[in-house]
Image: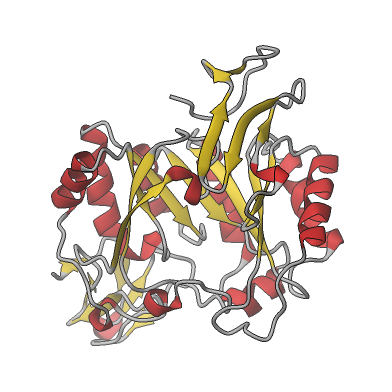
Amino acid sequence: MLIEAKYYQVLENKKIRCTLCPHECILFCDKIGICKTRKNIDGKLFSLAYANPSAVSIDPVEKKPLLHFSPSTQTFSLATAGCSLFCKNCQNSNISQVSPLQTKNYNLLPEQIVDLALKNNCQSISYTYTEPFVFYEYMLETAALAKKQSLKNIIVSSGYVNKKPLLELIPFLDAANIDLKSFDNADYKKMSGASLQPVLDTLIELKKANVWLEITNLIIPSFNDDAEMISNMCNWLVDNGFEDIPLHFSKFFPTYKLLNYRPTSNDKIEEAITIAKAAGVKYVYSGNIYGHKNENTYCSGCGYLIIEREGFSVLNNYISKGKCSNCNHKIPGVWS
């Protein structure tokens, strides 16, 4: 189903500038943007990604990962094909690096997504797997309908989006996990085709709007595992008021165009966690390491174990009314 896109400018001779993300692709008639989801048809921009998700699943919210947001609940997850980035380490390249015209899709309107989430006892809908901003119109309409049904909305995103579309979506958002891929602009472009500053701007806007936020940094050997870079990133987070925001350091495994890279060592993840805590980040987690001690949550006030996890499962939860049951310290997050 083709629908007209929301964010674009018409230029001379029916050329179009898409203004959804910082790439701001300029498209001649019949051309498709970098994201593979937006096409110039006779001087108007249309979305190719409306109501045709290529991935639909029910996940524990911990899988996003969100560890301080509605623990032990299920989230209805969906994605269309396409992406505004070309990450060499993409785990979902079979759908992210192709057009919705090239994938096997479901035919699901926004109201059907909401109905499915409710019927499957999900407490939220997650726009995930690929970059959700490339199916912006679909996500926005679904999120608005979900909000009316008391469903929460989650984005798992690169954060590579322009301010105006982000601000239009924010009133419907409850939580976000943003992938902060590197803290070096040249490396960011080399690995993903994106740049760093727009991602930092997105983090600031989400925090300003009180959207619950968690940040993931996938540590890739010889790319973004430099201790000084990790330290600079953590210092920026603390200096800009993100010290209470959970930070996830995830282990990389060879995939897609990085099959010749080695997996991240557990020692490197431990080093990053130590650096983050020394900088003042209060809640730091390991990712992609099953059974690691840093998948648990400890009170930043007294050090007490308040959420014990195994993988994506919560074994014990000692948070009461948003506070540590041992010392009554307030734990940042959304716990209801």
Residue 249 in percent (x, y) is at 68, 54
Tell me which colouring the rendered structure shows. secondary structure
Question: On the image, which quarter does residue 258 sit in?
Answer: bottom right
For the image, the number of numbered tags is 0
Vertical position of residue 210 compared to residue 268: above or below: above
Looking at the rendering, in which quadrant would you find the N terminus? Answer: bottom left
Question: In this image, 309 relative to 183: left or right?
Answer: left
Q: Residue at x 19, y 62 (%)?
A: 51
Residue 181 in percent (x, y) is at 63, 63
Question: In this image, 98 relative to 14: left or right?
Answer: right
Looking at the rendering, in which quadrant would you find the C terminus? Answer: top left
Q: Which residue is drawn at 72% across and 62% down?
A: 183
Vertical position of residue 90 compared to residue 325: above or below: below
Between 49 and 53, the residue placed more toward the observer is 53
Vertical position of residue 132 compared to residue 45: above or below: above
Residue 293 in percent (x, y) is at 71, 43
Does the image show residue 220?
yes
Vertical position of residue 176 compared to residue 121: above or below: below
Q: Which residue is drawn at 75% across and 21% down?
A: 301
Does the image show residue 232?
no
Residue 191 in percent (x, y) is at 62, 77
Question: On the image, which quarter does residue 97 sit in?
Answer: bottom left
Q: Residue at x 79, y 57 (%)?
A: 230
Question: In this image, 22 relative to 263: left or right?
Answer: left
